[in-house]
Amino acid sequence: MSTTVPVKAQNSVAKKQTPEFVQLLDPDGRRLSDELYDPWISDVTGDQLASLYEDLIIVRRIDTEATALQRQGELGLWPPLLGQEAAQVGSARTLRPDDFVFSSYRENAVAYCRGVKLPDLVRVWRGTAASGWDPFEIGMATPAVIIGAQTLHATGYAVGCKFDGADSVSVAYFGDGATSEGDVNEAMIFAASFNAPVIFFCQNNQWAISEPVGLQAQRPIADRAPGFGIPSIRVDGNDVLAVMAATRSALDRARTGGGPTFIEAVTYRRGPHTTSDDPSRYVDPAVAAEWEAKDPIARVEAFLRSEGVLTDELAASIQARADAVAAEFRAGCVGLENPEPLSVFDNVYATEHSGLARQKSQYKAYLEGFEK
Amino acid sequence: MTELTLAKALGSGLRRALSDDDKVVLLGEDIGTLGGVFRVTDGLQRDFGTERVIDTPLAEAGIIGMAVGLAFRGYRPVCEIQFDGFIYPGFDQIVAQVAKLHYRTAGKVRMPLTIRVPYGGGIGAVEHHSESPEAYFAHTAGLRVVTCSTPQDAHSMLREAIASDDPVLFFEPKRRYWTKGEVDEDADGLPMGKARVVTEGSDVTLVTYGPLVATAIDAAVAASDDGISLEVIDLRSLSPVDFDTVAASVQKTGRLVITHEASESGGLGAEIAATLTDRCFYYLEAAPVRITGFDVPYPAAKLEDHFLPDLDRILDGVDRALGRVNSLTGWSA
């Protein structure tokens, strides 16, 4: 099927009825029209939306498998992304290979879309490495655990792109909690002052561990950016099409010299902060149920079925593919080898440091003492 | 060879680095139009443009974090922190990001940043403008920490720091900015990781760095009037420390005095005393002596002479290392 994702009488509401954010696909799978943002996805075909649907299914399946691996003792920790799949897939799938992502630690779907090798997703969580992958291989920095620090890196990278005369864009992913950090505010100031081609992609998932977004912001987070001189978009983060449209418009602005854009993707963290967290201590089950009804995958499925794109047969084959990815992911995870003891000294410096060289040789001799 | 002040020698080093490598960019507050509050970057923005010599907003984390991003993009940023006491807002980016990214990425991402920091007291400044925070950074794995004491070293070491693929904290002794000396831009100098024996001597090894090197040389002259021969060592590098050079000297003299402006506790002096005690235990005739700033916040200008080690306090330390209790000695180790 090659027709674009249309607004049709039988499956649409004529006019967007929710002024709180950009929404092109409502929770019931109805395609809403939006004069400003429809053009940004006018080329998306039913097959392409089905491909996004497959991404959403696969990243959720990986997430489920990772939590299982943690519960089985194969991972020390895992930060689930349940509920945030559309925000991550919809934005990451619009990027070019030469764009560069600076993320936090929950952006596993972004990493998947950037082409990460599956075991690389969990090296850090299994404790076999300080982080997962070669940033230059997939155009994505290894995640920043210090909240918000990466927004400055994205800004600097974007300034470098501008100096190079390249039309590459950098994207900073961060959460609602990060917006209280000084680094994020400084990043917006620097990005505006240097007109940097950077996108500030904030997934407002309503929670910073146990702290609700109301503790970070008294107004919609997107409202802050204009004060820095940065245009902002508030988008339904559970709507993969709206996220894609918003990201494309921001990419276009960045590539054509228009500078930074702030996107607030309104979503919800339906799982715990990490596998060590217990959300039952702070989440109202009624609110959680409301968000479950706004599931990012169900609406795409409903729409694709109404369009006749998604058949039972296709759905089954996508699920089978997701299960196969999960199996490969599990095998890769448990197959990760423990690092050699002396590698604890590797890569602290690019060139030899005499103090560290002494410690390494002493520890090597100490270890060899056990072999005698 | 040209005679330059230490500040001008740094400026000429930056100029050469900008000319030699078009990936070198300078970032900092007031470094462009003004040429820096100490005029170290004077004329560089005029000659290299606003994309090579960048005036930034007033945010130290922003400066360092932006430099990290530029390094990801293949640039070789040189950040100026306007004063020692202003570095703390950037501390997280330095310690958590700059220092660890190479390790975190298994060597895939290099952080060839140079972070220039005018440091130390003796200029009668107000609070936050006279500090010596080098120990924080020498304690941090992944960073190299160096400091210069002469115009030649200022020029050569700064260029070497910028060319280094590791991040370098480059501490500039601000009260010596106006010290003059011959500078040969093409000199094949001592590598920045090596300590230099400034004054050879046989009785006591006096280890120092940065602003106190000149004071230590004066102390050696004064001591020689009393028939005491001091061997003065300018460490130059604080991470790593060139312990081989210090140990060779202590094995000769059997006595060690370390002096720095920074506070005593947890300072470089403690590290040097501990390591040299370990390496030279059977050569030492006396316990190593530290002459340092006190464990107080940097005091008001009219009190700084009571904080900073000076010639007399250093000589008092030398006396203690020689086992001489003199009238100035109010304590024993």
Image (tube, coloured by chain):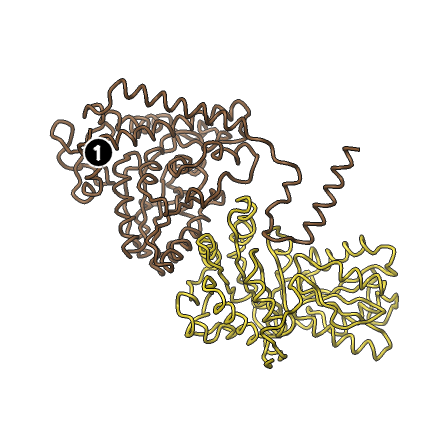
Callout count: 1
Q: Is residue B172 left or right of residue B69?
A: right
Q: Is residue A120 left or right of residue A167?
A: right
* Residue B98 x %, y %: 53, 52
Q: Is residue B199 above or below residue A346?
A: below
In terms of depth relative to the viewer, which is nearer, A153 or B267?
A153
In terms of depth relative to the viewer, which is nearer, B87 or A3?
A3
* Residue B203 x %, y %: 85, 69
Q: Is residue B255 left or right of residue A41?
A: right
* Residue B31 x %, y %: 46, 70
Tell me which chain appears brown: A
Q: Quadrant of residue A362?
A: top right
In terms of depth relative to the viewer, which is nearer, B225 or B263?
B225
Q: Can residue B27 be seen?
A: no
In terms of depth relative to the viewer, which is nearer, A31 or A147?
A31
The residue that appears at 87% across and 58% down in the rendered structure is B283
* Residue B39 x %, y %: 50, 75
- Density class for disc 1 (Cα within 10 Å; few <14, some 14-19, many ≥20) is some
Q: Which residue is mark 1?
A: A45
The amino acid beneath tag 1 is: Thr
The residue that appears at 40% across and 22% down in the rendered structure is A323
Q: Can residue B165 be seen?
A: yes
Q: Looking at the rendering, in which quadrant would you find the N terminus of chain A?
A: top left
Most extreme residue toward the bottom, as rendered?
Answer: B3
**Mark 1 falls within which chain?**
A
Tell me which chain appears yellow: B
Q: Quadrant of residue A237?
A: top left
Q: Looking at the rendering, in which quadrant would you find the C terminus of chain A?
A: top right
